[in-house]
Amino acid sequence: MNVNLYGCRGKWIMVDLGMTFAGPDMPGVDLVLPDLAFIEERRADLLGVVLTHGHEDHIGAVPYLAADLGVPLYATPFTAGLVRRKLEEEGLHRDVPLHVVPLGGKLALGPFACRYVALTHSIPEGNALVIETPHGRIFHTGDWKLDDRPLIGDPVNEAELRAIGEAGVLAMVGDSTNVFNPEASGSESDVREGLMRLIAGRRAGRVVVTTFASNAMRIQTLGEVARATGRRLVLAGRSLERIVEVAREAGYLRDLPGLMPLDAAATARPETLLIASTGTQGEPQAALARMAEGTHPQIRLEPGDLVVYSSRQIPGNELAIGRVQNALAALGVEIVTDRQAHVHVSGHPGRPELEAMYAWIRPQVAVPVHGERRHMEEHARLARACGVPQAVVPVNGAVIRLAPGEAAIVGHVPAGRLVLDGEVILPADSTTMAMRRKLAWGGLIVVTLVYDRRGRLAGDVGVLARGVPVEDEEEAFLADCAEAAEEAARKVPLADRRRLEDEVKLAVRRVARKWTGKKPLTEVQILDLA
């Protein structure tokens, strides 16, 4: 979830505006957005949002937050196409100005002059930014890798990068994701060869390849493999279809072989099909998960079919991916991942690529980003070993002075998280989310006390439990809760309602903790008989 702010002479530019997906600690939530409170308070001084490339962790928050910022967006053609569709889906395309910058293009925003520099990534038009300021030049890498044989776009222009370094670079703000990888990430052409070897040997059955929808290079690879192996390429997943549409509009994937519609694939001979599918991370509504469950409307997998995971497993998604793979195995489907065959390469730089970039750019300061703290600390060590005089490792909300003077963290600003809960955006640490977590982890107990006109308990205490692990002993558990609630209630007069509620809650929670070891969310209702 990437959002970067550069400030100079009281003005600001934002680089990227991404989102991430919610983990199991946020029940009911799909998307997590950055809290932009700091810059929203200074929106009069924000000049624009410059987008490096089209991955969701760099553009995904645009349709939810950009309108409130009230500034233009800038992106190269392919990224702009993806953003435009997002804005159209939310009815915001007339409210948020979107400026298309040509490849290698420039833009001037107050004291900042930005130039796009093409770098290879796992999506078309991965870009670095050269940001000129009165105090020096910043090289913001975005997400990148080195690929001498990309299937879309040109290889990284080493001469151009050396020229940037020779002109002088104050700071490089760079990708740390694969810093522990001792080898270069590898080429998409190598993946094509690996998939070709794997699929060419299959004479029967469907082949399903699940990959990140945004990886247009992989779609190009699959098109070439389909053509060479006598199969027809089928797209299963709306996000894959959208990527192909935008890529073709931007001039890519023009030689992709003719796609077979999903409806036609439903009745086609299995051995003629190569199906590109969404669902690499076990997403329950994605095409692959529905195929595994037997609920996909067109594709029914059978013994003898092959599913290839042409992707990496994102930490935190192991259980979801495992559930889908177990379901596939139960169908008799063969599964191949990057552990069994060369079917995926990362879009981020390994150590040799980082060392090459530092040799070309030669910054005075390294600012590692894109990774966990352990990645960024290791990246800082690598940068120093490459001769970079200074390295500053940030945390979320860190204010880093790059110039004038020595680079250092000089302050911190709020940098929280928001969640998209249905159609509502809330702070991740809101009361609603705290209660949602308590409900998910401990369950709910509702106690109802009924009082007559004289302020005395009338009738039995009512207790309702939901999600509390008592199962076959629920009746006895509820009786114990009711007894404890009644005993606590008789000690406190009805006039002191706040204390009455608190004492009953404590008494019932003690019973729940004794029975289950858990602390369910407990609510007390007090009803007065007129």
Image (cartoon, rainbow, N blue to C red):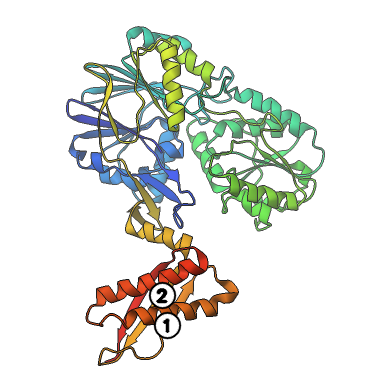
Three-letter amino acid code at disc 1?
Gly
In the displayed structure, 193 sits above or below 268; it is above
Is 96 positioned to the left or the right of 198 in the image?
Answer: left
Residue 195 drawn at (x, y percent):
70, 31
Q: Nearer the viewer, residue 530 or 524?
A: 524
Instruction: Look at mark 1 in the image and give the residue it sits on.
Output: 462
What's the residue type where badge 2 is placed? Val
Q: Earlier in the sequence, mark 2 or mark 1?
A: 2
Look at the numbered disc 2 and give the secondary structure of its residue: strand
Up the image or down, 447 lies above or below 125; here it is below
Give the residue drawn at x 40%, y 30%. 52
Q: Tell me if label 2 and label 1 are in contact, CB under 8 Å.
A: yes
Q: Residue at x 36, y 26 (%)?
A: 393
Quarter location, residue 492 = bottom left
Residue with the mark numbered 2 = 446
Residue at 23 percent of width and 35 percent of height? 46
